[in-house]
Image (tube, helix red, strand yellow):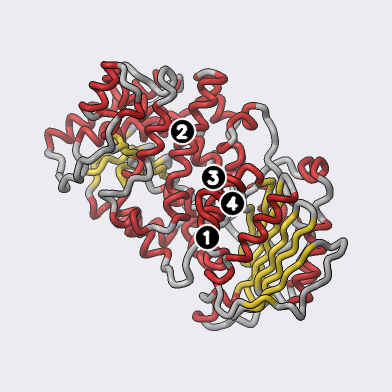
Amino acid sequence: MISTHRIGQRGKSTIPVFAIACALLTSPTMNAQAASGAKPEQAPPATAKPQGETHITPEQGKELFRSVDELIKFASDDTGLPIHNEVKRTLTSRTEVEKYLVEKFNDDEDSKRMQRGEIVLKKFGLLDRDFNLKPFMLALLKEQIAGYYDSKTKTVYMLDWVDPETQKQVLVHELTHALQDQHTDLEKWNDQTPADPSHNVGEDNDHLAKDELDTARTAALEGQAMAVFVDYSLKPTGRSLIKDPEILDQIQSQMSGSEDSPVLARAPLLLSESMLFPYKDGLSFEQDVWMDKGKQAAFAGVLDRPPSSSWEVINPRVYEQGKQSPVLVLPDIHPLLNKSYKAYDIGQVGQLDLRILAQIFGGEAAARELTPAWDGGIYWAGQKLSAKTPAELASTNSVALMYLSAWKNKVSAHIFARMYADELGRKYSGVKLDVADKAPASVQGDEVVYSTNEGPVVIRVRDKFVFVSESFDLETARKLADLVIDGQGTGEIRTAEVAIPRAGLSTSLAKFMHSCGMMKAAILR
């Protein structure tokens, strides 16, 4: 994925909980409706105003500590994952949590990759050019964090400023992560994506082959924890995620609420979607596997054979059938580029990334139309060797980008190419169709060239492939297009050559945020 999902501290893998709009599940209104048999969609919209910050008393803290054993037993019964060891527990302050978040940003490998990838995200148009990622992410996490489990110290952390009842809901989520850790050592299970840029064709394709693993595994972990969270919240009503599957739509509709979260309300779509994906799509994935294959397959089975791409998470049936994600390969581009560029970033543009990209560029309708037609995507970014100063290195002008997407049909390929071209004005100034340099339609496909303030943009459609080059000179861009498209082969061969799916644009963001703990946006209102 585009470096947004790999933020997790190596050697200290903490798993955040998204504060899921829980008031909806536990409110008297909903409980009364459940007792009367009213349909979930009849529930009125939540109107509760956010409460002021409270601090847990010593007596409340002791009660919370005692509740850990009861809550982990509920999680064990709900998942079928056995309790092997007692989970350590501690109450932490806002100052300590903020210090922990700052340290993660400074030391975490995923954080470093995410910040390095900020230029690439801006080059793609997923972030505005003047957006400053690090301070905004820090503010967002400080606002959203609701509790976390540290798989290195085997400790669950409770927050002393969150009221005890909400803490119990968060605890049951985080204790599910503790059970997952006891079943599958999360220190080894996580962090599958290489941290450093690749420098040759072998490293390129190894990186691509592993790039979406972390995103998919994060969604599996959070989906399981959300399933337990929902069942615990519904327990007083006698309902559950499996007995009452229609509740899922209502839950998911509440996850994007930001009425009491001013930082989240201002977040770019990329950040909010990356934060919500593991909770929202992960929960849907878990419900489908649980209903289709049973509890053992949904929990222990998913941990033993996790999904390997956002495509499998978004399409649980293909995971159940053991199908492989569409795979694109990268031929050896280094002899063509190494004299002018150093490798900067590489990854997949997975189905999640494409969904976000289409929504930003074309709106909800475009995302609904194009996401199912996605059939693979990869990108490579190089930084100019001529860029020397800090200002030059921090500029999108120092980076050239190539992006190849594959589609299930030619119509979708052309729709995506037009949509991408129409949005160039959002990213660059002086965008102008370069008629003089337009190549004639041929066996090489349809090509358009645009001039911009950061160099040429070439968009070529050939069959079901769309190749985009941004800021490479025209001659290099055309050589890259021929080399990369020709390197794919046919669909059957292309999918069989590399069996492991890759990471995507949003990988570092999603993984980093969820390594920090549960977010309050995941708590139902």
- Seen as rendered, the residue at the extreme right is 443
Give the mark toward the camera: 3 or 1.
3
Instruction: Give residue 215's mark.
Output: 3
The residue pinned by badge 4 equals 354
Label 1 close to label 4 by CB (< 8 Å): no
Mark 4 or mark 3, earlier in chain:
3
Percent across and percent down for residue 385 are: 65, 78
Q: Amino acid at mark 3?
A: Thr
Instruction: Give residue 283's mark.
Output: 2
Residue 131 in which image quadrant: bottom left
Q: Amino acid at mark 4?
A: Leu
Please report the residue visible at 56 percent of the width from the left and 20 percent of the height from the top. 292
Mark 4 or mark 2, earlier in chain:
2
52 vs 193, nearest the viewer: 52
Give the mark toward the camera: 2 or 1.
2
Give the mark toward the camera: 4 or 3.
4
Percent across and percent down for residue 263 are: 31, 57
Q: Could you tell me which quadrant the C terminus lies in? A: top left
| Rendered view: 165 above or below 32 | below
